Image (spheres, grey):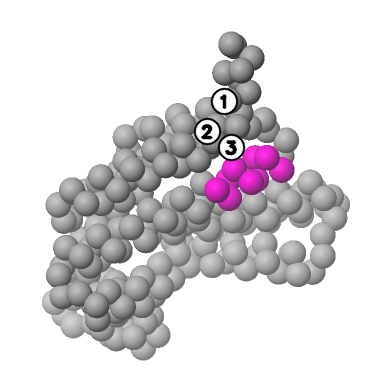
Amino acid sequence: YARTFLDFLGSNTIFYLVLTLFFVQASWFVLSAGFPMLYDEFTHVKTIELYSSQGGAFGLTQTAQDTQLLGDVTRTGSYLYYSLMSYAYSFILSVSGSFYVQIVFLRFLNVLMVLAGLVLYRKTLLAAKFSKKSINVAFLFVTSLPIFPYVSAHVNYDNLLFLFCAFFVHLGTRIIIQKKTSLPEIIGFISVGLLGSVVKYSFLPVFFIGVLYVSLTLL
């Protein structure tokens, strides 16, 4: 029985169950939590609304009231999340006038970002020769922490950064494992890191260290 249990623990079924459990937990927060949720959701949503009203990040202007409420978002380096989400917001705004529906839609998009990031992290760990058992147990532990599905259910740029970070690590790991690379792979790796840095500028140190480490492994 122990052997059967361990084999099952390392199966793809367990991984899909972990993802399902995470999605159910996050969905509960998405649907039941009042607006705004704790981690700056009000600021993120209002910034998305501002971007949507002006068609994106470029040529953005603010009124004195907007600046007092949100800070100077016209000069922020962390603009990619707001720009992308503004198009999603414009879409749902054209479909429904319900503020609840709009927030739920934006929150679910954030949950999907984290789900995609988890899938990418698993691919990276498998490529690095971690066992499926250890990956499934680790993912079950992380996704079961109450804060993880809670933050994932927010309208928050950290969720898009989670996805970009997973992609960045995946591309870097693949280059290291191959011990060689091509120009398209290098361009892809650096491009993802740069895009992650304009999702949230605090990703820049991770980007620089990642590029330096990968470069040293290729010497």
Q: Which residue is mark 1?
A: 9
Whether residue 57 is in magenta: the answer is: no
Q: Which residues are magenta?
A: 119-127
Asked whether disc 1 touches disc 2, contact meaning CB atoms under 8 Å apart, the reply is yes
Disc 2/disc 3 C-alpha distance (Å)? 5 Å
Q: Is residue 189 above or below residue 16?
A: below
Task: Determine crowd level at label 1: few under 14, some 14-19, many 20+ residues with C-alpha closer than 10 A.
Answer: some
Q: Secondary structure at mark 1?
A: helix
Q: Let me know if residue 86 appears in the view.
A: no
Task: Determine crowd level at label 3: few under 14, some 14-19, many 20+ residues with C-alpha closer than 10 A.
Answer: few
| Residue 121 horizontal side relative to residue 172, left or right | left
Q: Position of residue 67 (x, y in %)?
A: 20, 74
Asked whether disc 2 touches disc 3, contact meaning CB atoms under 8 Å apart, the reply is yes
Which is more N-terminal, label 2 or label 1? 1
The overriding secondary structure of the stretch rendered in magenta is helix
Q: Position of residue 73 (x, y in %)?
A: 31, 73
Q: Which residue is mark 3?
A: 12
Amino acid of disc 1: Leu
Amino acid of disc 3: Asn
Q: Residue at x 29, y 53 (%)?
A: 154
Specify the quadrant that holds the N terminus. top right
Asked which quadrant contains residue 87, the reply is bottom left
Amino acid of disc 2: Ile
| Residue 3 horizontal side relative to residue 13, left or right | right
Q: Position of residue 130 (x, y in %)?
A: 68, 33
Q: Which residue is mark 2?
A: 14
